[in-house]
Amino acid sequence: MKKLTTNQIEELLKSLDGWTYENGSICKSFVFKDFKEAFSVMTRIAFEAEQQNHHPNWENVYNQLTIKLNTHDVGGITQNDFDLATAIEQIVKTG
């Protein structure tokens, strides 16, 4: 895994709607109808994260979910973070 530069991160973020680069992570917050919907999506994300062997930092409060991705092994952002973010977007869109 290769740590991406700030320029590479900013370029890749252009393809991910609403994701930002903050404090060494790519981040996004999602709002759902209720807790049950948020937790359902979190469960689906958990299965995908396990499949990719790349796990998010996240926080859930009622219907809100905030996800932060980085690669601890390299101390920054890698393509793995963008791959998981893309998969998360697909999971959220398919409800």
Image (cartoon, grey):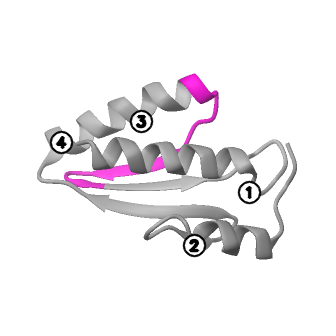
Q: Residue at image x 41%, y 51%?
A: 89
Identify which amino acid the numbered label 1 is placed on.
Answer: Ile
Q: Give the range drawn in magenta.
A: 51-64
Q: Are discs 4 and 1 less than 8 Å apart at CB? A: no
* Badge 1 or badge 3: first in the primary sequence: 3
Q: How crowded is mark 3: few (under 14 residues within 10 Å), some or many (20 or more)?
A: many
Q: Mark 3 points at which residue?
A: 45
- Is residue 61 toward the left or the right of residue 83 in the image? left
Image vertical order of residue 65 relative to residue 90, above or below: below
Identify which amino acid the numbered label 4 is placed on.
Answer: Glu
Question: How much space separates mark 2 and mark 3, taking CA atoms?
Answer: 22 Å
Q: Mark 1 points at which residue?
A: 77
Q: What element carries label 3?
A: helix
Question: How much space separates mark 1 and mark 3, taking CA atoms?
Answer: 19 Å
Q: How crowded is mark 4: few (under 14 residues within 10 Å), some or many (20 or more)?
A: some
Q: Name the residue under label 2.
A: 14
Q: Is mark 2 on a helix, strand or loop?
A: loop
